[in-house]
Image (cartoon, rainbow, N blue to C red):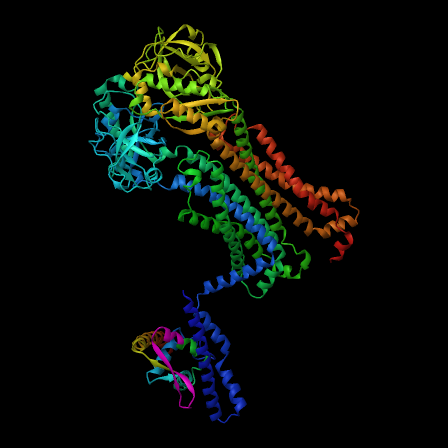
Amino acid sequence: MVMKRPPEAGEILQGTLDMLILRTLVLGPAHGHTIAQAIEWTSENALEIEQGSLYPALHRLEDRGWVSSEWGVSANNRRAKFYRLTIKGRKELNDATGRWRRMTRAIGLILGESFE
Amino acid sequence: MSLRWFSNRTRKDQDFAEEIESHVAHEVDANTAHGLSPEEARRKAHLRFGNARTVREREWSDRSLPWFEDLKRDFSFALRALAKAPGFAIIAVVVIAVGIGVNTAVFSVIDAVLLKPLTYPNPEELVSLTNTSPEGSFPGASIPRFSLWRQQTSIFQQVAAYDFGGAGLNITGSDHPQQVEGVHVSADYFAMFGAPVVAGRTFTAAEDSPNGGHVTVLSYGLWKSRYGGNPNIVGSTIQLDGQPYLVVGVVGPKFVTDTPADLWVPFQFDLNSKDMVVFFTVAARLKNGVTIPQANAQLRLVADQFRRLYGDDSLPHGGGFGVASLQQELIGDTGSRLLVLWGAVAFVLLIACANVANLLLARAAARKREFATRAALGAGRGQIIRQLLVESLTLSLTGGLIGLGLGFAGVRLLLKMNSGDIPRIGEDGAGITLDLNILLFTLGISILTGLVFGMVPAISASRANLAAALNENGTHASIGVRSGKLRSVLVIAEMALTVVLVVGAALLVRTFMNLQAVDPGFAMHNVISMSMSVSGDRFQKTAPVAQVIQQGTDRLHAVPGIIDAGVSNCLPMAGGFGMSFDVVGRPKGNSPSTGGAGFCSISYGYFNSLKIPLLRGRSFTKEDDAAAPLVAVINQAMARQYWPNGDPLKERILIGAGAGPAFAEGSRQVIGIVGDTHDGGPNRDPSPMMYIPLAQMPDLETALNSRVAPLWWFVRSQVDPRTLTKTITTALREASDGLPVAHIRTMEEIEATNIARQRLNMMLLAIFGSAGLLMAAIGVYGVMSYSVQQRTQELGVRMALGAQASNLRNMVIRQGMTLTLIGVVVGAGGAFWLTHFLKSFLFGVKPLDPISFIATPLLLSFVALVSIWAPAIRATRVDPMTALRVE
């Protein structure tokens, strides 16, 4: 639902974007544009987000209480809505990261047999 | 789901819009920093963000309940669609309102009579004690029976006795004597029925024993109406039949007994009495956990005990005791009667459904292009069906709401005109109230109706071939063969259902006519009846009663315009008392007596007042008094049954032999034979009757009688007796030294209540049948009009090729009548099978009555022909040029 131009990434499993957002917010509060850029940059542009799609995900996280938001002023001196990781969100990030690691390891094990 | 939730949603959307703006602004900043021109930076930013509107919409719908949104949209669309076709909407709503209205009406009666439990607490525990015999069971008790029953504490919590109907009592001691329903009860009566006491108390066991003193408990109604709710009434004394009675309590307004009562007095039985006379009724409350079969098993043993105590003859051979649910007993056969009515109204509703489905199909045909367009724009089949179902539910719920009002007002109005002898509906149907049962029933039936008549057209419309529909010329879009067939099937079904209804109505109309045609055997015209309660110490012997009768009769004879006046202790058409008798000198064989017959004590003016003809011998005169030889008059039915060859006038009969000391008397000479009267109602054959002079009754029997039944006066006059009411009541009060009269009714009024249930049945089915007929006519008219309209072109071509107008007309008529005839045949088959359920409601007509079965199809075919005529004529008026130019 999220990825555009996904040749390498393939279909990212549901919830993955949530995890990436939460991960980005570990560094501190950020507004949507920063989050989008951060995900793109840190993944070396492999994951290019359709920026509009980021927001429903952010709002969903907020509904679940994993992030909180407030309007503030950005580095560009513009009004922007800043998202902050909550304690619940931090816990969810841990859980999600664990799930992801277990899954990629499992996938890696299967792929490893045929490629190595 | 609150409004706040929705407004919140709007606020969030605005917030999101700002957020998007901010995001784009940041992206523009970034792009400008990369050296792009402002325009290029802005363009790229928007490109990068994607479609902001889509994102917002998705978020909006993520925050909604999709089905609720859809339903809201479908509903407002349905309202708009229906508003565009007001004619259709109004007809459909009216048809549904009628269909649901009659259902609500009948259900509200069923609800009041069958579904609502008795107004007493834990009514399922209440049973009436009955005497069982191989012929069936009947209520009634004597003191020894009551005494033994109330000892069965292992199965009963309480056992209480009360009057069958009661003789009535007179409140005296003021200028306004009043005859009231005074019911004798045993002390446990109030506790057993859970009567709420609002003041004072009810009877103690001591007060309910012989010499317990004169005490009474008042009903709330009497307390309010006669004593103005006097708070000091308890402890004061009122006069009943000249005797002072201490008021010990008042019972609350919610205590409504099925024998209505104004006040209660204790029976004060001597429980050691061996008097076998059956003159009151007994009910009991079962112990917790005791079932009716368990109680019956116990009572079989009690019957054996009864025989041991009082001798083998004390119970008839094969007779015993048992219990029956009190509620069942009160309802009687009303249940099956109401269910038959319900069957009939279900038919009305089905016809209404078929009719509206038909209308919807026609409408769906006209809207075919609309559906096709919507399908082409991406509406799924499910969405179209849902849309159509919402439309039909909108119709059915509106119709249901109107039907609820219609049905409820209708049933009250109908029962006001004619209560139809239905138990437990209160005065003029006041017992029928709007309750949750009725509301839920109407809501349920409305939804069901909407789904039933909406489903067929919805599915059929959603199946339409897209391309074909869009390409078709709008003016004569047809919905295809399939739905044409569907509509024909619906019309056939309507016709068939109507045939069944109308045949049923015809049978009941004939029943009612037959009943009215029955000669009751006595005069109805210009005869008025009224009751006089001869209770109290004054009338415990025969002589004072006979004196009141003679003085009253003399006074009435002196009134100009009065032809004759007579008295009886039973009311014609209300049934009398049964009594055994022996023909003196005739061998009885194994049976205890020669036979049984109805038994009435009458005054010498009785036969003439009611114009009951004397067929042989002589009738009673003033001289047949206590001093004269004992005499009896019998009716023709009795003469036929017991003297098929002999001459009753030459024999003597001994009445009430073995019925107890109250009836002990000498044998009577049969002196005359009178005509039969239909005492069991016009639909029953006259039964054997014996009459004796009231003046010759044994004293003990008079005393018993004064507690069981009032005296009934019958006055025949040359003018309308209602104009004489005041004169008659005054004359009787003066003659009797102050006795009031009550229950003043003409015999015609009594007769009307006697056949009230048949009248109500007939009226209802006639209404249902007419409703069905009307709807079926609309149905066949609709289908044929539509068919003619669809075939305008074809008809034009035929005409252009030289077809005669009459040919075209006949073709349309032939098609319409084919549908009708199929429906009639199917319906007649259904009626053939269904009318046997009506059997017990019919009189003088068989369920397969040829007249009803021939007349109904003829009537229906005629109505159908009239309905088809207009479209048929329209077919002949098709202008070939216009028809062909359509292409």
Q: Is residue B442 visible?
A: yes
Residue in the picture at 45% in, 73% down: B10
Residue in the picture at 45% in, 7% down: B645
- Find out whether residue A62 is within the magenta segment: yes
Q: Left or right: where does residue B743 sit relative to residue B149? A: right
Question: Measured along the vertical axis of the image, is residue B384 above or below residue B349?
Answer: below
Q: Magenta region: which residues?
A: A59-81
Screen quadrant of the C terminus of chain B: bottom right
Question: Measured along the vertical axis of the image, is residue B210 above or below residue A90?
Answer: above
Screen quadrant of the N terminus of chain B: bottom left
Question: Measured along the vertical axis of the image, is residue B348 above or below residue B666?
Answer: below
Q: Is residue B845 visible?
A: no
In this rendering, the count of numbered labels is: 0
Q: Left or right: where does residue B207 sit relative to residue B873? A: left
Q: Which residue occupies the extreme left position in the image? A: B206
**B840 and B799: which is toward the camera:** B840
The answer to which image quadrant residue B181 occupies is: top left
**B550 and B521: which is toward the camera:** B550
Q: Left or right: where does residue B499 sit relative to residue B712? A: right
